[in-house]
Image: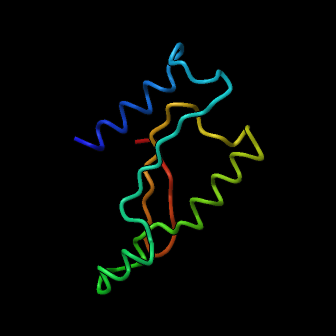
């Protein structure tokens, strides 16, 4: 239920007349598992090569901030899948 609510919130905020500033962009990043110290602590035997790096996400956010042409369309639901340490992004 919570994931569906985030998806709907993203789409609603991106819609015309939502009340947010017109130049705003609303994007939902949908990783499977984030590679964080706490996840590593509680799942030490998991395959960490399938976890999405927070650095990878930070790099994308920075890229989208400095180059608007690379920014996904507002309302995008972006699935992040990491395999062998390589992350791919696709529309959900």
Residue 62 spot, x, y in % from top left: 70, 54
| Placement of 79 over or under 68, stated as above or below | below
* Residue that appears at 77% across and 47% down: 66
Front position in the image: 42 or 75: 42
Residue 56 spot, x, y in % from top left: 58, 64
| Placement of 26 over or under 64, stated as above or below | above
Question: Would residue 36 be found to the left or right of residue 22 on screen?
Answer: left
The quadrant where residue 55 appears: bottom right
| Placement of 6 over or under 61, stated as above or below | above
The quadrant where residue 47 appears: bottom left
* Residue that appears at 45% across and 73% down: 36
Front position in the image: 86 or 56: 56
| Placement of 21 over or under 36, stated as above or below | above
* Residue that appears at 29% across and 80% down: 43
Front position in the image: 82 or 12: 12
Quadrant location, the N terminus: top left
Residue 24 spot, x, y in % from top left: 63, 30
* Residue that appears at 44% across and 78% down: 37
Residue with the most extreme top position: 17
Residue 65 spot, x, y in % from top left: 72, 46
């Amino acid at each position: 239920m919570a994931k569906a609510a985030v998806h709907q919130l993203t789409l609603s905020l991106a819609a015309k007349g939502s009340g947010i500033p017109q130049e705003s962009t609303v994007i939902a990043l949908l990783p499977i598992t984030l590679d964080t110290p706490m996840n590593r602590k509680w799942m030490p035997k998991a395959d960490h090569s399938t976890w999405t790096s927070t650095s990878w996400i930070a790099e994308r956010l920075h890229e989208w901030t400095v180059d608007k042409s690379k920014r996904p369309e507002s309302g995008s639901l972006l699935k992040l899948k990491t395999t062998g340490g390589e992350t791919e992004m696709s529309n959900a």
